[in-house]
Amino acid sequence: MADRPTVVNTSGGGGAGTAVAIVLAIIAIVALLFFTGIINVGGRTGGGGSTDVNVKLDAPKVEAPKVETPAAPSTTPAPAPAPAPAPANGG
């Protein structure tokens, strides 16, 4: 009997391994996000279990700026000047 060459088929067959690797990677990412707190399922919190947050904010008092208006000019006419005294004629 003559020895025949062994043929190894490498085109394909790796799809199942790739699919398993992708599924495991997705599960690992979801687990990481869950344990770091980015994904919050069922009201799970990192502290005392309460989701109520009380925040007291005092708003600053806002006042309009005070603007002083100038006095209005008088509408009454100014008095006429008195007539000048008549010149003396010398006599």
Image (cartoon, rainbow, N blue to C red):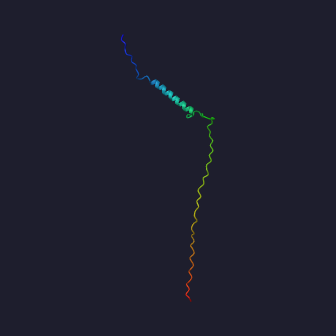
**Picture quarter containing residue 64?**
bottom right
In the rendered view, would you say 67 is above or below 27?
A: below
For the residue pair 41 and 22, the one nearer the viewer reads as 22
What residue sits 54% from the left and 31% below the top? 32
Q: Can you name the residue that lies furthest to the left here? A: 2
Q: Can you name the residue that lies furthest to the front here? A: 90
What residue sits 53% from the left and 31% below the top? 30
Quadrant containing the N terminus in the rendered view: top left
1 on left or right of 64: left
**Picture quarter containing residue 79?**
bottom right
In the rendered view, would you say 65 is above or below 79?
A: above
**Picture quarter containing residue 33?**
top right
12 on left or right of 42: left
What residue sits 47% from the left and 26% below the top? 19
What residue sits 48% from the left and 26% below the top? 21
Q: Can you name the residue that lies furthest to the bottom here? A: 91
In the rendered view, would you say 30 is above or below 75?
A: above
In the rendered view, would you say 52 is above or below 17?
A: below
Quadrant containing the C terminus in the rendered view: bottom right
Q: Position of residue 2 (x, y in %)?
A: 36, 11
Q: Position of residue 59 (x, y in %)?
A: 61, 49
Number of marks: 0
Q: Position of residue 36 (x, y in %)?
A: 56, 33
